[in-house]
Image (cartoon, rainbow, N blue to C red):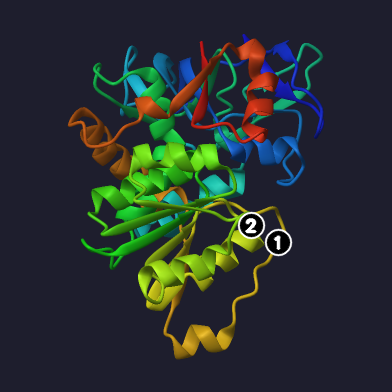
């Protein structure tokens, strides 16, 4: 089968014919239908997130189950599935305590399958990694059955692909926050794919004010479609000062969906007394933000991280699929660019330029 393979950081990904092993115990083969062009893969491409290579990137996808390994019980051939980039083991401490999005075993095995081996090889026998055990920039993938969440036929594959990452990360990171209540004020810093969905999450929770912050006017204009009530261009004005003035002291919840020292510090500064700053975006490896400790204590503020929607991905998938079918969230409107697999490098050039919405690879 064909896949886009990253052999070296900051180099284009060629489309390569790879040998794919059959699924082993507990695994399935999925024929890919759609894959989202997400910034997390871009961080690997640029070397900001060191990852073993060669590797097939892509972690936001949907497809159809076409083969089962021994012992598979949760899906069947022909199932249309949202793919989870955390295929939780169900047995580690994180899984047992309700944090399957932080599965210990999944993280320890990384880009290998759960038995520590590979399913992809080049013609000369070189082992090829799969990003998040998925590697959806490929015609087909062999993955753990836990990565697959069956969905109704009415859900388009492009929608399902985005639910696999950006929708769950953004909306889930809002609606799954303890203490989130109707009428609260919210700021979302970063109006990319995850940020747009955080705006939708705030709208779902009936936030009274939803402020989007970005450096591009066209992205801020786009943000109004997904729930922003106010927008701030942080290149033109200090977003912290603007938010404090607009909200009489700060927002109840500030979300950094970009992931950078600057944006985390902005989110913290825009959070009111007793409020919560939520870091959703992944910063470059090793980067740190400066948080004033006296502000943390005197103003009793909370700083938390949110990974993959802050809860079980499968549980959040179920809610989001229902919301989509009920017309309560807009996922179709986020897809602004469609590409063939052979156009993967051009797709990431558009992402790096800061284009609106989400690009999708359609198989």
User: In the visual, does 204 lie left or right of 221?
Assistant: left
Q: State which tag comes first along the sequence, 1 or 2.
A: 2
Mark 1 crowdedness (10 Å alpha carbons): few <14, some 14-19, many ≥20 = few
x then y, percent, for residue 336: 48, 23
Element class at badge 2: loop
In this view, the residue in front, 145 or 134, is 134
Front position among marks 1 and 2: 2
The residue under the point 37% across, 69% down is 247
User: In the visual, does 81 lie left or right of 277?
Assistant: left
**Figure check: 173 above or below 339:** below
Look at the image and tell me whether residue 349 can be seen: yes
Query: Residue 3's quadrant in the figure?
Result: top right
x then y, percent, for residue 77: 34, 13
In this view, the residue in front, 237 or 86, is 237
x then y, percent, for residue 25: 46, 27
**Figure check: 289 above or below 363:** below
The residue under the point 59% across, 17% down is 138
Element class at badge 1: loop
x then y, percent, for residue 128: 71, 26
The residue under the point 34% across, 51% down is 229
User: In the visual, does 70 lie left or right of 106?
Assistant: left
Q: CA distance from mark 1 to mark 2?
A: 7 Å
In this view, the residue in front, 218 or 26, is 218
Considering every residue shown, the one lying at the far left of the view is 326
- Marks 1/2 in contact by CB < 8 Å: the verdict is yes
Look at the image and tell me whether residue 23 can be seen: no
Q: Which residue is mark 1?
A: 287
Q: Which mark is residue 260?
A: 2
Mark 2 crowdedness (10 Å alpha carbons): few <14, some 14-19, many ≥20 = some
Query: Residue 211's quadrant in the figure?
Result: bottom left
In this view, the residue in front, 363 or 30, is 363
The residue under the point 46% across, 46% down is 195
């Amino acid at each position: 089968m064909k896949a886009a393979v990253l052999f070296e950081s900051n180099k284009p990904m060629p489309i390569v014919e790879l040998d794919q092993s059959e699924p082993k115990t507990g695994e399935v083969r999925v024929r890919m239908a759609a894959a989202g062009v997400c910034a997390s893969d871009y961080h690997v491409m640029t070397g900001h997130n060191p990852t073993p290579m060669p590797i097939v990137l892509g972690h936001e996808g949907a497809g159809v189950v076409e083969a089962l390994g021994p012992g598979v019980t949760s899906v069947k051939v022909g199932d249309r599935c949202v793919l989870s980039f955390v295929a939780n083991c169900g047995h580690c401490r994180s899984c047992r305590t309700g944090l399957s999005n932080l599965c210990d075993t999944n993280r320890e095995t990384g880009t290998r399958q759960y038995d520590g081996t590979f399913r992809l090889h080049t013609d000369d026998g070189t082992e090829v990694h799969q990003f998040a055990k998925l590697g959806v920039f490929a015609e087909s993938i062999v993955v753990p059955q836990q990565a697959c969440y069956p969905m109704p036929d009415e859900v388009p594959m492009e929608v399902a692909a985005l639910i696999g990452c950006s929708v769950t990360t953004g909306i889930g990171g809002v609606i799954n926050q303890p203490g989130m209540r109707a009428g609260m004020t919210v700021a979302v810093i970063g109006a990319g794919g995850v940020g747009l969905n955080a705006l939708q999450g705030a709208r779902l929770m009936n936030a009274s004010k939803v402020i989007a912050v970005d450096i591009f006017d066209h992205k801020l204009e786009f943000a109004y479609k997904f729930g922003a009530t106010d927008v701030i261009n942080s290149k033109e004005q200090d977003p912290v000062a603007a938010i404090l003035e607009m909200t009489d002291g700060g927002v109840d919840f500030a979300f950094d969906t970009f992931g950078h020292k600057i944006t985390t510090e902005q989110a913290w500064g825009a959070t009111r007394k007793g409020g919560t700053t939520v870091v959703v975006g992944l910063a470059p490896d090793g980067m740190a933000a400066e948080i004033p400790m006296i502000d943390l204590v005197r103003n009793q503020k909370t700083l938390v991280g949110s990974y993959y929607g802050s809860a079980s991905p499968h549980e959040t998938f179920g809610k989001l699929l229902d919301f989509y079918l009920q017309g309560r969230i807009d996922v179709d409107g986020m897809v602004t660019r469609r590409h063939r697999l052979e156009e993967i490098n051009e797709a990431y050039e558009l992402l790096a330029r800061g284009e609106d919405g989400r690009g999708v690879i359609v198989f």
